Image: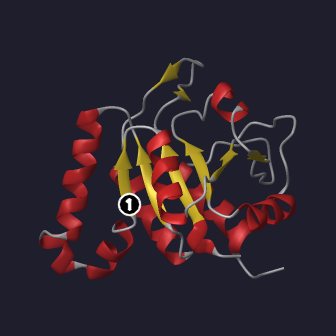
Amino acid sequence: MDSGKIYIALLHHPVYNKSGVVVTTAITNLDLHDIARVSRTYSLGGYFVVNPMPAQRELAGRILKHWLTGFGAEYNPNRGEALGLIRVVGELDEVRAEVERIHGVAPKVVVTSAKTSEGSVGYAEARQAIEGYGPCIIAFGTGWGLTEDFIAGADLLIKPIEGGGEYNHLPVRAAVAIILDRLLSDRA
């Protein structure tokens, strides 16, 4: 599989809060760093942080500047290599347009959810579908997950990660790592 045609989109809107209300969540430093490092490890085409709030995008830009051109770039060049994959945008349509500009074809959108939904596929089937897609955006939600309307508009929904018990509320950073490993690793 050509992992360079796969992009992560971390969406801060439209997502639910714990009461089921559609909200916009805040960008976190940990999500920037950890998901960028996972994206770099799996040689992805890029990592998009999607937040409609200008102040949030500005904050992310200041953090990235520190690690890409500021003191952080000298202190830890490896971190800058990973964070260089990040593009901060206001909406998913910007992600679609950028991926289409790079590859010359519109990308498919794959979504993930911690909730079981009809029509979701397992990792073997998802891997096969992604291999046939060409460029692909794997969208992850923050907060309490992507909205049902957003999920319904995707090209593919991957089944939730299942652990050994009833609890199923992984941090998004862990979910990204687990899902990418299941989709892209060479292990059987």
Q: Which residue is mark 1?
A: 86
In the shown orientation, is residue 97 left or right of residue 4? Answer: left
Residue at position x 67%, y 45% from top? Answer: 111
List x then y, in percent, for residue 29: 33, 52
Quarter the C terminus occupies: bottom right
Residue at position x 51%, y 68% from top? Answer: 45
Q: Is residue 16 above or below residue 120?
A: above
Query: Please, which colouring scheme is shown?
Result: secondary structure
Name the kind of residue labelled 1 in the image.
Ile
Q: Nearer the viewer, residue 70 or 103?
A: 103
In the shown orientation, is residue 14 left or right of residue 83? Answer: right
In the shown orientation, is residue 122 left or right of residue 24? Answer: right
Q: Nearer the viewer, residue 17 or 101?
A: 101
In the shown orientation, is residue 4 left or right of residue 74? Answer: right
Residue at position x 33%, y 68% from top? Answer: 84
Quarter the N terminus occupies: bottom right
Residue at position x 25%, y 60% from top? Answer: 64
